[in-house]
Amino acid sequence: WFMTKLRLAMKGKSIFALEDLHQDPQFLAAPRDEQAVFFDQGIRAMVIMPLVQDQELIGFIGFDSLRVRTWPSQLAQVFQESAQQLASVIASLAKEHRLMLAMQTDALTGLFNRYYLKQHLPNLWAEAQQGSQSLAFVMLDLDHFKQINDQHGHLLGDQVLRQVGSMIAGHLRQQDLAVRYGGEEFLLILLAVDLDISRKVIQRLLDAIAGQRFQLEDAQELQVQASAGIAGSLEAEEISDPWYWIDLADQRLYQAKQQGRNRVITA
C-alpha cells in the first residue's frame, strides 16, 4: 500500500496527502503486517513530497501525524518549498561527491589514483601503527605491456588494464587498498597480513592474470603476465615512513623483472 502511494506521488512529482489512514479503503485492504507498521506507531495522517531537481526525481520526504488532520493549501505550499530547497541541497552534495570521486579514482580501471593515495596514506599508516597492525606493500607491473600497445593498439591495452583492475579488486578484501600507480603499474596495500600470506594472495592474483585470455582481431588469443614485489612494515619496525616500504616494494618488483618476470619477490 505505502509503496503504491509513494510511486504515484513520485511518478506525478506532486504532493500526496492523507487526512485519516483509518478512512482510506486501500489502506484498510492492505496486508495486516503493513497496517501494523502504522498502527503500532500511532500514525493517523501523512503527507509525502517527491524531491525533484532539474526535472529529475532524486527522492522523497514525508511527514506523519499522530492524529487525524487536514493539510491546508498554505501548509502544502510550505512543504513544497521546503522540498524544493532540500532537493537542491541534495543535488549539490551529490555533484560534489561525484567530483571528489572523479578526482580520487582512475577513470580506466575504477581503482584509486595517486591523488587518493597521497591524501589517505598518512592516516592509513597512522591507524596501522596505533593498532600494531602490519601492512604489506605490493608493487605490481604488467610484463612487456609496451609491446601490447605497440603491436595490438591502445584499445586492447586499455581493455587489458580494465580487466586487470577488475581482477585486482576481486582478489583483495574491502579493507585493502588498490591504486593505479601509473601506466601499467599498480600499488596494493594489504592490511594485517604478513609477508607469507601476502605472497600467497599476490601469487594467486598473478596466476589469475596469466590465466586470462584476450581475444585478438585475427581470432588468436593474447596472454598477459605480471610481476610483483612485496615489502612488509614489520621487516623493520623502527622505520616510520610508509613511502620507504613503497620504494622497497618497487625495488623488489625490479628484481622480479630481472629474474625472469611473472613472479613475486618478497626479499
Image (spheres, rainbow, N blue to C red):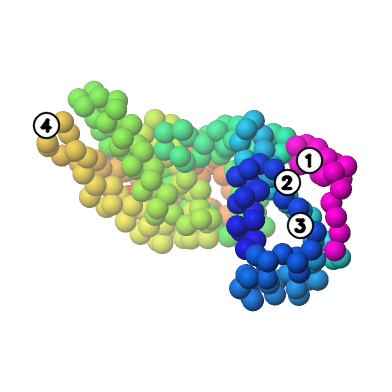
Residue indicated by mark 2: 15
Magenta stretch in the rendered image: 68-85
State the separation of the CA atoms marked 3 and 4: 66 Å
Q: Nearer the viewer, mark 3 or mark 1?
A: 3
State the separation of the CA atoms marked 2 and 3: 10 Å
Crowding at label 1, few (<14), some or many (≥20) Cα neighbours within 10 Å?
some
Dot 1 and dot 4 residues touching (CB under 8 Å): no
Q: Nearer the viewer, mark 3 or mark 4?
A: 3
Residue indicated by mark 1: 80
Q: Which mark is residue 218?
A: 4
Q: Nearer the viewer, mark 1 or mark 2?
A: 2
Q: State left or right for residue 221 relative to residue 41.
A: left
State the separation of the CA atoms marked 1 and 4: 61 Å
State the separation of the CA atoms marked 1 and 2: 8 Å
Secondary structure under badge 1? helix
Residue indicated by mark 3: 18
Q: Which mark is residue 258?
A: none
> Compared to 202, does 117 lie above or below?
above
Q: State left or right for residue 52 relative to residue 210.
A: right
Crowding at label 2, few (<14), some or many (≥20) Cα neighbours within 10 Å?
many
Disc 2 marks a residue whose amino acid type is Ile
Residue at position x 62%, y 63% in the image: 1
Residue at position x 53%, y 41% in the image: 244
Crowding at label 3, few (<14), some or many (≥20) Cα neighbours within 10 Å?
some
